[in-house]
Amino acid sequence: MAELVIRDLKVSIDGKEILKGVDLTLPQGEVHAIMGPNGTGKSTLAYTLMGHPSYEVTGGEVLFDGQNILELEPDERSRLGIFLAFQYPVAIPGVTVANFLRTAVNSRRRAVNPEDKGVPIPEFRKMLKAKMEMLKVDPSFAGRYLNDGFSGGEKKRAEILQMATLEPKIAVLDETDSGLDIDALRVVSEGVNALRGPDLGVLVITHYQRILNYIKPDVVHVMMGGRIVESGGPDLALHLEEHGYDWVREKVDNGSVPA
């Protein structure tokens, strides 16, 4: 069973330290949520995990399957089984959803075996159809250009379809609920829940508790000032929704949790 282990992770952007010693362990098969006010480093953590070049790691380590992934390129991390669903997915005009996904699958296959000719088109179509049926995605979706003219909900649904197709071991959802109305949020959450199971660990990064009404976390973490300062069960998210973050700030200021 794989797990993602983050130890004392410190990250800077343009010389400014954002993450100041993050510690977190996410086992495969569990769903963890990270909540916190704006500017606390949640998205920085997500992009650092996937190797965004703008984020400079100045300390700590991130282990996955016992390997320090900070030494790997983003595509290598992806092939290990780590997936990031973006807060703001980009559009790729001229490239259909189906062609994009088939290219991604073939890239992974060729990384394992350079002689691999790629998944045959009939086999891929059958696989994609099954994934779309599982996620309740209209078949016409496959022929549309990736995220081009998509609504916010459609973009996030495309991200979940990518996740289903690539079958990662760990998925990081960076504010997947951002900009979604209740109906779109429910649809996306149902997709995540359809994929949930012992082979997938999920890290849900969010400002609000509402997505956690649909994706029930095993553990909730609170990030503040570039650190994880509080962790608990699902009730912690409800407490934050009702009382906000001031009580956490008071604990930090009083030295009850690390500053």
Image (cartoon, rainbow, N blue to C red):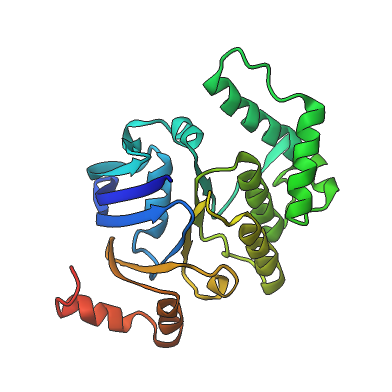
Which of 4 and 83 lies nearest the eye of the viewer?
4
Residue at 59% across, 42% down: 167
Whether residue 200 sits left or right of residue 118 in the image: it is left
Which of 43 and 242 lies nearest the eye of the viewer?
242
Picture quarter containing residue 226? bottom left
Residue at 85% across, 47% down: 140
Picture quarter containing residue 196? bottom right
Q: Position of residue 95 (x, y in %)?
A: 73, 34
Picture quarter containing residue 18? bottom left
- The image shows residue 183, relative to residue 52, as above or below, that is below
The reply to whether residue 221 is visible in this rendering is yes
Q: Position of residue 99 (x, y in %)?
A: 73, 32
- The image shows residue 172, relative to residue 215, as above or below, that is above
Which of 182 and 13 lies nearest the eye of the viewer?
182
The reply to whether residue 44 is visible in this rendering is no
Q: Quadrant of the C terminus?
A: bottom left
Whether residue 256 sits left or right of residue 62 in the image: it is left
Furthest-top residue in view? 115
Furthest-right residue in view? 140
Q: Position of residue 34 (x, y in %)?
A: 41, 64
Residue at 18% across, 68% down: 258
Q: How many marks?
A: 0
Q: Position of residue 103 (x, y in %)?
A: 66, 29
Whether residue 33 sits left or right of residue 196 in the image: it is left
Whether residue 28 sits left or right of residue 126 in the image: it is left
Furthest-left residue in view? 255
- The image shows residue 79, relative to residue 34, as above or below, that is above
- The image shows residue 101, relative to residue 33, as above or below, that is above
Residue at 56% across, 60% down: 176
